Image (tube, grey):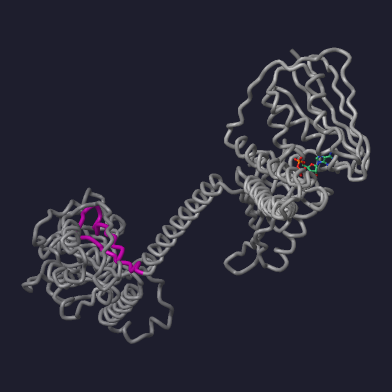
Amino acid sequence: MSAGPAAWEGPAHSRATPTSRPSPVELLLQVGASLHAALVVDSQGRIVWMDSVLAGAAGWRSGPPVGRSAEEVLGGLPWLRHALDEALTGTDGLREDAGQEQRLSAVVVPVFGEDGTQLGACARLRKSELPGPEAAREPQALCPGAAEERRAREHLEHQTSLLRATFDSITDGVIVVDLARRITAFNKRFQEMWGLTDAMMEERDAEKALASVEPWVTAPAQFIAFIRQGFEPSSAYRDYIVELRDGRVFECGSIPQMLGDAIIGRIWSYREVTAERQALAEQGRLLAAEHEARERLEESFALLDTFLNHAPIALGFIGRDLRCLRINDALAALHGRRREDDLGRTVREMTPQLAPIVEPLIRQVLDEGIPIIGLNMTGEGPGTSGEQRHWNVSYYPVRSASGTILGVGAVVAEITEEYRAQAERDRLLREAEEAIRVRDDFLSIAAHELKTPLTPLKLHLQMLKGQADASGHVVAPRHVDKALAQLARLSVLVNDLLDTSRIQAGKLELTTEPIPLREFIREVLSDFRGTNSLHSLWFEAPDEPLVIRGDRARLAQVLANLVENAFKYSPSGGTVRVTALRMGTEACVSVKDEGIGIPKEEQAHLFERFFRARNAPISGFGGLGLGLYICRDIIERHGGRIWVESEVEHGSTFHFALPCL
Ligand code: ADP
C-alpha cells in the first residue's frame, strides 16, 4: 500500500470508525489524503470521495457524487474515466485533457490492500500550460499516452523526494501513526532522536516502536499512557515533556491527522529541549541561589543590626566622606541624640568639640589602612556641662572583599567610671603611702621622743646615786628636779599614746561638772608660772563670769597642751596670750603666740593623728603629733569646736569654743 508523509487537506467526509484495522474505504481515504488526490474510487469504480472542483470540471451537477459510478459522474472527462478504468485493472497511468485551454492532467494510481487485492484507485490532478509548437513535435506526441505517464511519474517522484527531503530536514522528530497503530510516516530526525533502527521502522508497528523506546524514558508508565491515549481518535492537541535516562528532554506535541472531518491518525512531533531545560534549570538554580544569598544578606544585616543596637559599647561606621553610615544607640547617645538623627551626619556635625581630634585620626586610618586601637579621650558629654567624661576609642579600617577601604569602624567604650575608680584607687594608694610614711615618721619620732628624756634622767639618777654613795654628801635638789622634769616629759608622751588608743577604741570617758571658766584658766596657767624664762604668759580674763560644763582634767589637758605648743613653737620667745570671752551662747578660749606659725595648706590637717607641720623639725620641737588630735576629740566630746588662725613667721592663735551654761 502507498504511504506518504505529507499532510492532506481533504474535503468533507464521513468520520472513520475507529477500529483496530481500518476498512478498505478508510485505507483508500488515507492513501488519497497522502496523495492529495482529487478523486478516490473503490475497486468497483464507485466514487469514495471527489473534489467539488473536479466534479464541476466533469460537468456533474446532480448532487453528491460519492457512491455513484465514475462512469456516470465523469461524463465530461472521458480521458479520466478511461485512466481510472485502466488503473482499476492494476496499471497506473497519467491522463491529460486535451480539450481545455489549460491542459488538465491526472496521475491515477491503483491502491492495493496488504493482502494484494486491489482496493480502488486515486487520481491526483495537475494543471499545466499548453505546450508550445516544439512540444507538439516531441516524440511523445506521436505516442501521447506513454510519454505523459512517464512525465507524471517523474514529476510525482520529484515531488515526493522533495517532500521527503523537506520532511527529513525538519529539526523536530515527526512520526505519523494511523488508527491501526501503524506508522504511516516518520522523518530521519525522529529515528535519530529515539535511536530506532531501520528494521524497526520498516515494521511500521507503532506499539513495537513504543516498547523499544520505553527503557529510555525515566517515567515509562506515564509516557506510554500518554502515547496510547493519542492512539485513540481525538481532536485534542496534546503535549508532554519526556525525560530520558541519558539526560535528554523532549517536548512532545501531537495533533490529529485529519482527512476532511475524519480523524485518520495522529501526528507526533518531538523537539529536543535539553539545552533550554538545562538553561532553565540553571536559571532557576541561580535564582534560588541569588534568593538564598539575598536572604542570608538580609539575615546578616538583621543580625548585625541586632548586635549593633544592643551592644553595650558604642559602635559606628564612618564612610570615606566622613559621614555616618551606621551607628548604634549607644554611640548616638554619647552625642546626645537618637540613632536616626545621627545617620548621614558628618563627624563634625555629630561631635563638634572632638572633631578637630577625631577627623585627622579617621583620615589617617582611611589613608594608611592601619587601625588605631585603645585611644583615651576626655571631653564633656552632652547634658553634663563641666563634667569631664572619658572614653576608650578605637578606629578600624573596613575593607571590601577586594581590599578597598570602604570606611572606618569606630568602637567607643565609655570609661568614665573606670577612670574615676582608678583615680580613687590612686588617691587611696597615695593616702596609704602617706599613712605609711606618717607611721614611719611617727615611729622614728616616738623613738626619739621617748629616748630623749631617758639620757638626762639616767645622768641625774647616776649623779644622785654617786652622791648617795659618797657618805656625808647631801643629794642636790636640782638633780632631783631635772630627773622629775624628764619623767614628766616621758609621762606626757606615754599619756598621749594611751589617750590616742582610748580615742581610737572610743573609750575616752568624761566626768563632767560645771566649771567657772575664769578660775579654771587661772588654775591651769598657774602651773606654768616660773617654768619658763624665755616667754611671758598673759591671761585676759573675761568681763563676765562664764560657766561651762565639762571634764575638768580633760579640759585642763587641752589648755595646757595649747600653751605648751605656744611655748614650744615660739623658739625665739615672746608673749603667749590667753583670752576667754563670750561668743553668743559659747565661751571662747584663745591661746595666741608669736612663734613660727603654720603654713596655710597644712592647717586643715593640724588636728589629724600624727600630723606635724613641715616647719616643725624634730630637733627643738619634739612631739608625736598627737596633742592637737587629742584636744579636738576632747573638745568635740564636750559639744564644742576647735580651730586655728596662723601665718608662717607671724605666730598662731588656737581657739576652742564650748557651750555656756
Ligand atoms: P606635737 O606638738 O607633739 O608635734 P601637736 O598635735 O601638739 O603635736 O601639734 C601638731 C603640730 O602642729 C605640730 O607638730 C606643729 O607642727 C603644729 N603646731 C602646733 N601648735 C603650734 C603652734 N603654736 N605654732 C606652730 N605650730 C604648731
The question of residue 256 being in magenta is answered with: yes
**Picture quadrant where residue 512 is located:** top right
Magenta segment main secondary structure:
strand
Frontmost residue, 575 versus 329: 575
**Can residue 300 be seen here?**
yes
Q: Residue at x 62, y 35 (%)?
A: 503
Q: Outermost residue, bottom direction?
A: 139
- In this picture, residue 18 sits left or right of residue 137: left
**Picture quadrant where residue 520 is located:** top right
Q: Position of residue 468 (x, y in %)?
A: 70, 51
Q: Position of residue 137 (x, y in %)?
A: 38, 85
Q: Which of the image's four quarters has the C terminus?
A: top right
Q: Residue at x 83, y 32 (%)?
A: 654
Which quarter holds ligand 1?
top right
Frontmost residue, 359 versus 388: 388
Q: Which of the image's four quarters has the N terminus?
A: bottom left
Magenta residue span: 250-274
The question of residue 49 being in magenta is answered with: no
**Can residue 391 be seen here?**
no
Frontmost residue, 525 versus 19: 525
- In this picture, residue 29 sits left or right of residue 450: left
Q: Position of residue 329 (x, y in %)?
A: 60, 42
Q: Position of residue 310 (x, y in %)?
A: 53, 45
Q: Outermost residue, front direction?
A: 472
